[in-house]
Image (spheres, rainbow, N blue to C red):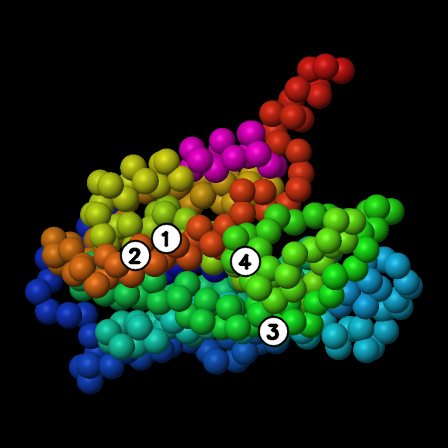
Amino acid sequence: MPNDAPSFPALDDFPEITTPLLPADGQARPRGRLSLHLGLFILTLITATLAGANFYASFLSDLGRRAVSLDLAVLTGGLWYSGTFLVILGAHEAGHYLYCRRYGLDVSLPYFIPLPPPFMTGTLGAVIRIRDPFRTRAELFDVGIAGPFGGLIVLVPALFLGLSLSTVVPDNPQLDATYFGDPLMLQWAASLVLGPVPDGSTLNIHPIVWGCWFGMFATALNLMPFGQLDGGHVVYAIFGDRVAAWVSVATVVAGMLATTFISLAWAVPTGMLVVMWRLVGLHHPPPLNPYTPPDTTRRALAAVGLLAFLLSVTPEPVHTVSLFEVLRDLLQH
């Protein structure tokens, strides 16, 4: 899952520096071995393509109505999913990277994170390392918001393309499948492309749509207003450290409530927030000038970022029982 938590140095306060921390030529110098970034990307492409082969096989089988063997053609078809998802993740990280370069910040190329079978996503996302402190809250805002916006620029047209390749098929009550929640963006796009789904029918979505679904989920996670996630960058830049810290606490509490009363699917993201809280804390590393808030245009873009979060998130990412239901069943037995 992409986030910028590893991107900041662990220190209590930046020293008072009045000159930008830039190389002598005024340009950021990406460091690190290109072979490492390329190798991780290739491994991630392989693991994501293996995951995508399952989505492609399900699509070809009309949701289990006919047998599909896992042959080379099906494995190659996994590229529909992996290509979509990795391009979305790459565009997300490119947004961060390009704005870091624009401001002369020392930044790494993306590190893609492979996740082998049986995990169904094939990847944990990608991260970059930002080695310099931000100079202003406006810089922090721009770098933070550029990632989700960059990913959405790729995601939205890919979603419409994938839906145009999807089909409406009779529901299969015999199918033992995992059911996913539908973000508003997916619901509205499906309505525009395919129209209303008749009773007793369901969507047999193309693997491109699966890549977009996980892209939306990654976007929503990154836009959560917590700590050093992209949403946390935006909240800190707009409102300052005190408000950002309280909003981070509220985000963790919301995740715990969602896990307890809506779906256990929120346990993993909420657990990751708790780990981040424990490792790096709630307070955001301040820019060198933490006092000047972003301008009105950036505040408007923050509202657009909130809208993107609401369109990408789903209350129940995976249809599972809640923690409350599990405890209730245990007590009844």
The reply to whether discs 4 and 2 touch (Cβ–Cβ < 8 Å) is: no
Judging by the rendered image, the residue that carries numbered circle 2 is: 302
Q: Quadrant of the C terminus?
A: top right
Residue type for callout 1? Leu
Which comes sooner in the sequence, label 1 or label 4?
A: 4
Q: Which residue is mark 1?
A: 306
Q: Position of residue 132 (x, y in %)?
A: 26, 66
Q: Main secondary structure of the magenta part?
A: helix
Task: State the mark number for residue 161.
Answer: 3
For the residues carrying marks 1 and 4, which lies nearer the camera in this image? 4
Count of numbered marks = 4
**Highlighted range, magenta:** 252-264
Q: Amino acid at mark 3?
A: Leu
Give the number of the mark in front: 3 or 2: 3
- In this view, the mark in front (1 or 3): 3
Of callouts 4 and 2, which one flags the residue occurring earlier in the amino acid sequence?
4
3 and 4 marks in contact (CB < 8 Å): no
The residue wearing badge 4 is 188
Q: In which quadrant of the rendered view does residue 292 lie?
A: bottom left
Q: Nearer the viewer, mark 4 or mark 2?
A: 4
Question: Which of label 3 and label 4 is nearer to you?
Answer: 4
58 sits left or right of 235 in the view: right
| Residue 101 position within the rendered picture, expressed as x and y whole percent measured from the top left | 30, 77
**Magenta-colored stretch includes residue 263:** yes
Task: Give me the residue at 50% from left, 40% from top.
Answer: 270
Residue beneath the point at 61% across and 29% down = 323
